[in-house]
Image (tube, rainbow, N blue to C red):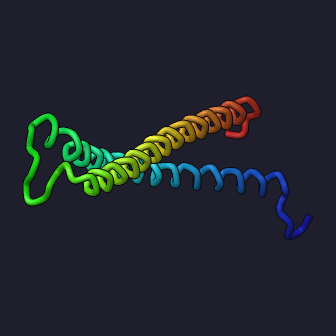
Amino acid sequence: MSGESDPFVSGTELHEEFIQRVERSGRAIRRLSLLTVFVAGVLAASYFGQLVLLPFALGVKTQTVDLVDPALMALEAVLLALTLAWLYIGVRDYAFVGKLERQVREIRALQAEAAKKYGLE
């Protein structure tokens, strides 16, 4: 075996590199998901305010545009639906990364337990 590495060691190193990449990627996805949730929440609140609060709750019917114009309301309803879909994706991705991080922690704990059991520390 001169010059060749042990396949078990190579596999272990590859597994460790993969886990580290998952951890780094998970942190980046979590940050992006939080930003997405924040932006989508602000947009959803804005569209909700324009569609419901201003014309119906506060009685504001016209400003520089007619707030109850069917074309405007339809456009804002579509934008609201897209924003809510964006919000859903952000929350779903955030939950996925949380689950992924828990699984990585479990793997790390199992690795540490195996290392203690077999004296590999």
Image point (67%, 30%), residue name: 113
Instruction: Tell me residue 62's x, y (percent).
Output: 9, 51
Q: Quadrant of the N terminus?
A: bottom right
| Residue nearest the observer in this picture, 70 or 43 | 70
The total of numbered circles placed on residues is 0
Q: Of all residues shown, which one is farthest toward the front? A: 70
* Residue 91 location (% of width, % of height): 44, 41
For image coordinates 36% across by 46% down, the residue present is 37
Q: Can residue 51 be seen in the rendering of this structure?
A: yes
Q: Is residue 71 left or right of residue 36?
A: left
The structure residue drawn at horizontal position 14% and vertical position 54%, both measured from the top left corner, is: 66
The C terminus - image quarter: top right
| Image coords of residue 39 (percent x, y) | 30, 51
State the residue in front, 5 or 98: 98
To which quarter of the image does residue 79 belong? bottom left
Q: With 12 as the anchor, is 54 left or right in this view? A: left
On screen, residue 16 versus residue 62, left or right, reads: right
Q: Nearer the viewer, residue 79 or 88?
A: 79
Name which residue lies at 67% across and 33% down. Answer: 110
In the image, residue 111 sits, relative to residue 22, either above or below, namely above
Furthest residue to the bottom?
A: 3
Quadrant in which residue 104 is drawn: top right
Give percent across and percent down for residue 50: 20, 47
Residue 34, can we see it?
Answer: no
